[in-house]
Image (cartoon, grey):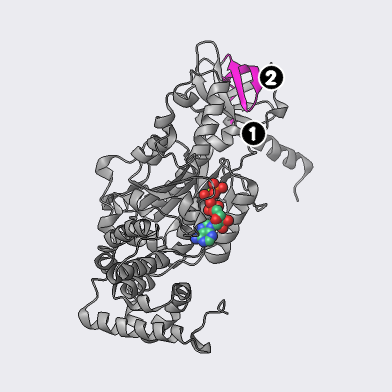
Amino acid sequence: MTTLAENLRGWIQRSRQRIETVSMAPQLERVGRVLQVGDGVATVSGLPDTRLDELLVFDGGVRGLAVDLGEAAIGCVLLGDAGRISAGSVVHGTGQVARVPVGEGLLGRVVDALGLPMDGGVPVARAALAPVERPAPAIVDRDLVTRPLATGLLVVDAMIPLGRGQRELIIGDRETGKTAIAVDTIINQRSTDVICVYAAIGQKASSVAQVIDAARRYGAPERCLFVVGEANAAPGLQWLTPYAACTMAEHFMTQGRDVLLVLDDLTKHAAVYRQVSLLLRRPPGREAYPGDIFYIHSRLLERAAKLAPDRGGGSLSALPIAETQAGNISAYIPTNLISITDGQIYLDPRLFYEDQKPAVDVGRSVSRVGGKTQAPVLKALAESLRLEYAQFLELEVFTRFGTMVDERTRKTIEHGRRIRAVLGQRQFAPLTLGEQVALLTAVGEGVLDSVPLDRVEAFRATLGSWLADHSPEVAKLDDQAKALPDDLRAHLKASLEALARSLAAPTAEHMGGSEP
Ligand SMILES: Nc1ncnc2c1ncn2[C@@H]1O[C@H](COP(=O)(O)OP(=O)(O)OP(=O)(O)O)[C@@H](O)[C@H]1O
Ligand SMILES: [Mg+2]
């Protein structure tokens, strides 16, 4: 039986051991004071050793980033509610740059730019912390972009193909379906192993909720991560969102995975940066943006890469989004972004109002990298499509003035209208490679010319199940598939003709659910 004295002796010994391990030496703490605070920024004095992008902690726990280092004062963007900070309150330097949690625990979650949960769930289980700003992979660590990133949208996959590791700008006016293209691409990754990270910057909470809902309903939400800096979040948080999202995405890339990063959108990001810069009294440049506006976007997008095999071979593809005013793609921020990225998908408001959706203007859209990655079977079919379509668009304008046209021209126009109809697509209905090949074959071989325009949608809706039943080889095509051999092509054509006939005289068996 132990006595009280023994108990006490043991306790004293343990306490001594514990005290010995505690450092009693004086510790240096860097403390400054707030000079001014308001509108999401603060000026701080008394922290002369602060580094650029260092995390500062204010009284009450609100954090801030040092973004402007002056001799007498430091400009700081706040990453939280400024309500609890006032002039004179204490600021602590941390000596650390801002870091966010990374790892598998983030998948399926909605978090803010600091990795704090926004979905009401438990704190994020993190594998590690990684800095939000990091140098981009060096050239020797990179490899060529070789695998396609299928969007499931025929107009993009056929005419503006994307590769894994590419940066493609989605650009267009307000409400022209920019987000819709990115969301459809995310949804299409349900049939691949690509991890999707969606960063919402300065968006309304309702728009973000719609995106999350669509991805959860139609996509593979367990492989998606949403990093949200809503319009009503602190400007600093909105500003940090794309960098934090990029760091979270990069982690998967370094593990050899393929990742898609959507940045929705960088025009709002630039506006937030301009706002905080002006409040911090940095000199305004063109369109009142600070001089380093190009650099803040280029250092972000340069982090998209395809890594070399000895670096794990992962990839990070970026789909930044930019908004234009009245179709002006030569404005400051759009031209910056166009020159940083490997191409752009331009959305035309006129096409959108004419109900041609996705409203991709094929003539003004390019992809400078992805062409080499396009599945050969699709490439063979898509080669002549762009030209045929462009010729049709010109002819159509010409005949709009009521010009009498001969039979051949009329046929070309009718054929062009079928091309346009197959390039349109509903939301949340990505097409498989097999379906895309079949659709392009149907247009190319003139099968659709006999189908009334308003039945093309029904043709597309039925195609998936029809192919599975009648052309299983085509339904199962993959990225590596070579151009269709003649016999398979003939067989596919015959099968598509049968489908076209069945639509001309509809039977209950082949009608989509939405058909009258
Ligand atoms: N392919 C499509 N088919 C039918 N409707 C579509 C299609 N693409 C987009 N839409 C609709 O068009 C509207 C605008 O789309 P979206 O929100 O993607 O545009 P946006 O350019 O991102 O707009 P914002 O400038 O507000 O961000 C939405 O209501 C969306 O449902
Ligand atoms: Mg949008």
Residue type pointed to by label 2: Ser
Near-viewer residue (410 or 513): 410
Mark 1 is surrounded, within 10 Å at the Cα level, by few (under 14), some (14 to 19) or many (20 or more) other residues, namely: some
Pinpoint residue 436: horizontal percent, then vertical percent: 36, 70
Mark before the other along the chain sequence, 2 or 1: 1
Q: Is residue 164 above or below residue 338?
A: below
509 vs 263, nearest the viewer: 509
Whether the magenta-drawn stretch holds residue 378 is answered as: no
Q: Secondary structure at mark 2?
A: loop
- Above or below, comparing residue 12 to residue 74 in the picture: below
Residue depicted at 45% across the width and 66% down the height:
430
Q: Which mark is residue 80?
A: 1
Q: Position of residue 245 (x, y in %)?
A: 49, 45
Question: Residues in magenta?
Answer: 22-46
Q: Which residue is mark 2?
A: 89
Quadrant location of the C terminus? bottom right
Q: Residue at x 63, y 28 (%)?
A: 40
Q: What amino acid does circle 1 point to?
A: Gly
